[in-house]
Image: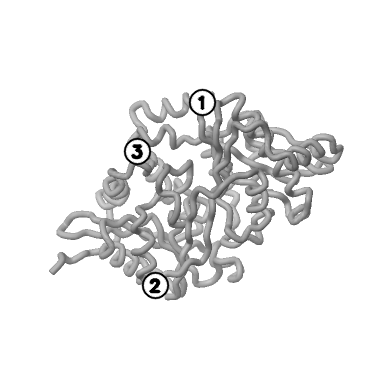
Amino acid sequence: MSEQIDVTPVAGKADFNAFIDCAYRLNANDPNWVPPLKMDMVELLTPGKNPFHEHAKVQLFLARRGGEVVGRISAHYDELALTQPVEQGMGPGTGNWGLMEAEDEAVMAALIARAEQWLREQGMTRVLAPISLSIWEEPGLLTMGHDHPPMLMMGHHNAAYQGWIEAQGYQTAKKLFTFDLDTVQDGFPELVNRIVAAGEKSSRITVRTVDLKHFDQDAAICIDILNQAWSKNWGFVPFTETEKAYGAKKLKPLIQKGANMLAYVDGEPAAFMLAWPDINLKLIDYGGKAWPFNALKLLWWLRNPQAKNWRVPLMGVVPKYQNSRMASQLAFMMIEYIRRYATANHGATRAEVGWILEDNQGMVAIAEAIESKINREYRIYEKQL
């Protein structure tokens, strides 16, 4: 008879450290898993450091067998998500679990059962998972693309997890895609190049880079556009004012002068696009350790990163221009300007665009028009409690 699996709430510093360390041990033999900095994981999970906790309730659990930690999971719900329309994925009664790691299927089953129990006790009637911790962080389970490391802020999971989770009665709610793009080509397909050229001649359109001297102001413009642009998207949860300031501070070191764009139409902010060098190229060798020198080395590298891989994680167009030719024109212009900059100044050879919802036809069409290909698929699952 197999040994009993005990799943208990994280209580105290030793448990908290064990929760963080569990992922590093269970993924140690996966060459494509990128260990996050442990100090970032502590910040993510600590109320008072991560403003997500201001409007969410989170409970962490550890699984032990024979006294040894063999898995972990977070169970949580976001009060802001509970206020969103049901037809957009979240809504009343919707809780989440995430940050799951398990040594085997029996451990995964025990962890999920305990997370579901906690969510029921909190009054939740439905689960969307995995989401770690927010939809804006690392949503979904990797179900395609295990053969290469993820880029910044994208998850990587044991390929066996898909079967283990689905065996617990979970059905796919939504698929998220990332698209791989060759950036060393001389521009995009001719049709896209003509659209970019036409936009450059238009007196209505202005595209500029984010101004690092006025970064807080430009970051606020980007996030305001994001809140507008994504407000009808599946899974949307708005940023709070505290989260806006926190996000700007966290992301500022990643901002390269010519790789982040704001577009204006008739003098009004209309769209933005961000692109970041993939710091996972560095983190994969750090083993999660920031000190004594890794954090300083990373910050020094970010002063002028020579990075082959770049990620375009966010783009938004104000609702006024969505589903119009203007939206695609602005997107093509911004990504072409980013391509030119990153290849000429930082040695970029490829970029990853996304994540993009499977049914976001406008963004999927843009990704296909620039001849990018799906390289990773993530799934968010659902289950009624």
Q: Is residue 266 left or right of residue 80?
A: right
Q: Quadrant of residue 274?
A: top right
Question: Residue lying farthest left?
Answer: 1
**From mark 1 to mark 3, how far is it between C-alphas?**
21 Å
Which mark sits nearer the N-terminus, 1 or 3? 3
Residue at 45% x, 53% y: name it: 144
Question: Mark 3 highlights which residue?
Answer: 288
> For the residues carrying marks 1 and 3, which lies nearer the camera in this image?
1
Q: Amino acid at mark 3?
A: Gly
**From mark 2 to mark 1, how far is it between C-alphas?**
45 Å
Label 3 secondary element: loop
**Image disc number at residue 169:** 2
Question: Residue lying farthest right?
Answer: 203
Which mark sits nearer the N-terminus, 2 or 1? 2
**From mark 2 to mark 3, how far is it between C-alphas?**
34 Å
Q: Amino acid at mark 1?
A: Gln
Quadrant, the C terminus: bottom left
Callout 1–callout 3 Cβ contact below 8 Å: no
Q: Is residue 90 left or right of residue 339?
A: left
Q: Position of residue 51 (x, y in %)?
A: 50, 50
Which mark sits nearer the N-terminus, 2 or 3? 2
Task: Report whether residue 129 is seen.
Answer: yes
Q: Amino acid at mark 2?
A: Gly
Question: Mark 1 highlights which residue?
Answer: 306
* Crowding near the residue tagged with mark 3, few <14, some 14–19, many ≥20 C-alpha atoms within 10 Å: some
Callout 2–callout 1 Cβ contact below 8 Å: no
Label 2 secondary element: loop
Q: Position of residue 34 (x, y in %)?
A: 38, 41
